[in-house]
Amino acid sequence: MAGRIAAFLLLAALLPASLAAQERGKSPEEMVDKARQSYGPAPPKPRCDKESQDPDVIVVCGELEKQEQFRVRTDEQAESDYARETMNKGRPPPAPNVDGDGIFKGPATFKLAPPVAPLIIDLEDIPVAPEGSDADRIGKGEKGS
């Protein structure tokens, strides 16, 4: 609900500014034509006039093709293409590295502390609780004081 109210307030704030920015006295059609000229696609390339009226003129029309398709690969490009195409020939491809570059490649960033030595208590060495003390009553199973 709050998002809709914020969008409405933003629209209400921008609408008067956009209306004020419009050129005065132009029709909407003229404004659309101007926008098409500014933001539309580039004009098409001029085509050659195949039907010339001058009988002494020879007209040759042709479009330039992309020359990349006619080029020969260098030895390095051919070797790398061949290696890439044949590297897993006859076996399944290796598992992808989901870690990304640089992750889990260096030393650990988090180390656990060495375990703490356990505390060993010899229960036979504990002295007997004095008669009537809290320890004596708890040892006998009595509750409270």
Image (cartoon, rainbow, N blue to C red):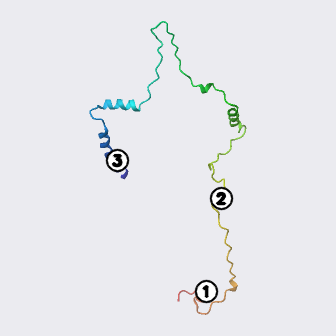
Residue where numbered disc 2 is placed: 108
Where does residue 138 sit, x and y in percent of width and height?
58, 86
Mark 2 is surrounded, within 10 Å at the Cα level, by few (under 14), some (14 to 19) or many (20 or more) other residues, namely few
Front position in the image: 33 or 84: 33
Q: Residues within 10 Å of mark 3 (few under 14, many from 20)?
A: few
Amino acid at pointer 2: Ala
Q: Are marks 2 and 1 in contact (CB under 8 Å)?
A: no
State the image coordinates of residue 114 (x, y, percent, origin top left): 67, 68
> Is 107 drawn above or below residue 80 in the view shown?
below
Q: Are marks 1 and 3 in contact (CB under 8 Å)?
A: no
Dots 3, 2 in contact, CB < 8 A: no
* Residue 78 as seen in the image, left or right of residue 67: right
Disc 1 from disc 3: Cα separation: 76 Å
Mark toward the start of the polypeptide (2 vs 1): 2
Residue 69, located in which quarter of the rendered image? Answer: top right
Outermost residue, front side: 56
Q: CA distance from mark 3 to mark 2?
A: 49 Å
Asked which quadrant contains residue 28, the reply is top left
The residues bearing labels 2 and 1 have C-alpha atoms spaced at a distance of: 50 Å
Q: Provide the secondary structure element on which disc 3 rests.
A: helix
Residue at left 48%, top 16%? 48
Q: Any mark on residue 139, and which?
A: 1
> Is 137 drawn above or below residue 90 in the view shown?
below
Q: Which residue position holds label 3?
A: 10
> Counting residues from the N terminus, which is met first, the one under dot 3 or under dot 2?
3
Label 3 sits on what residue type? Leu
Give the label, 1 or 3, closer to the camera: 3
Residue lying furthest top in this view? Answer: 55
**Nearest the camera: 88 or 28?**
28
Q: Position of residue 37 (x, y in %)?
A: 39, 29
